[in-house]
Image (spheres, rainbow, N blue to C red):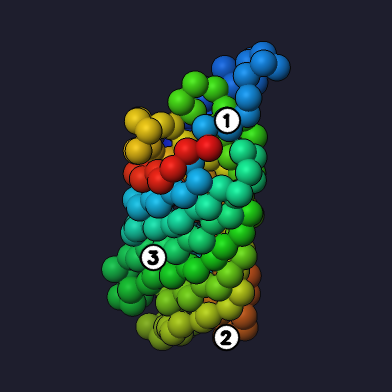
Amino acid sequence: MAHSVKALGSLLLFGLIVCSAPALAQSDRTPIAATAPIFEVSAGYAYVNLNMPSQSRVSLNGADGNIVVNVTERWGGILDSSYSRTGNVLSTGHGGSVLNFMGGPVFYLATRGNARIFTHALVGASRVDSAVPTSGTTILGGQVTRVSFAVGAGVEYDLSRAFGVRGSADYLRTTFVDAAGNFEPQNNLRAVVGLVFKLGNR
């Protein structure tokens, strides 16, 4: 599991470096996010590496969808929802899932050619459905819905005036219980790759 997380992180970091290097080298005459679409609708794949309190980590796979409204060339807002799941948590036989509804600002750091680099900060609520072993064959399972947040960055690449692809990586904070039934924070990793449909350009 640790190797897969490191490989995913390395891949995302490599993509960010490749796209950001030419952007940082651009001249002052190149406008930042000069062709930012006003509206963007995106859907794609979501991966969550979930931290279980006092236990191990669990990999979940699912889908993500979001809407971005760009207010200026640098600033926008995003509404995001994702659902990821697994069929068996920590060999308990209990399925697990994470459902997120969050929103917040988007800031475009730089643009070079067809690529845009962005960062975002999201706040909302997450429902974690999971289970933790307590003693012997006994498990503690259920759902916990609490305030959650995510911070991260990504790269968007325009395939045409109407379509693009976007990849991002986030630190995702959620809440679940430990084996004693106490609420504990979860420090998770979320990665999203999706297709973007763009409406209107500035």
- The x, y position of residue 114, in whole percent, is 46, 26
Label 3, on which residue? Answer: 83
- The x, y position of residue 80, in whole percent, is 48, 60
Q: Residue at x 39, y 50 (%)?
A: 42
Label 1, on which residue? Answer: 34
Label 3: which secondary element: strand
Measured in 3D between alpha carbons, the distance from the residue under mark 1 to the one under mark 3, in whole angstroms, is: 33 Å
Measured in 3D between alpha carbons, the distance from the residue under mark 2 to the one under mark 3, in whole angstroms, is: 24 Å
Q: Residue at x 51, y 81 (%)?
A: 144
Label 2, on which residue? Answer: 181
Whichever of labels 2 and 1 marks the residue nearer the N terminus, that label is 1
Amino acid type, residue under disc 1 in the picture: Ala
Rendered position, 169 above or below 77: above
Amino acid type, residue under disc 3 in the picture: Tyr
Mark 3, Cα crowd under 10 Å, few <14 / some 14-19 / many 20+, is: many
Let me know if residue 6 appears in the view: no
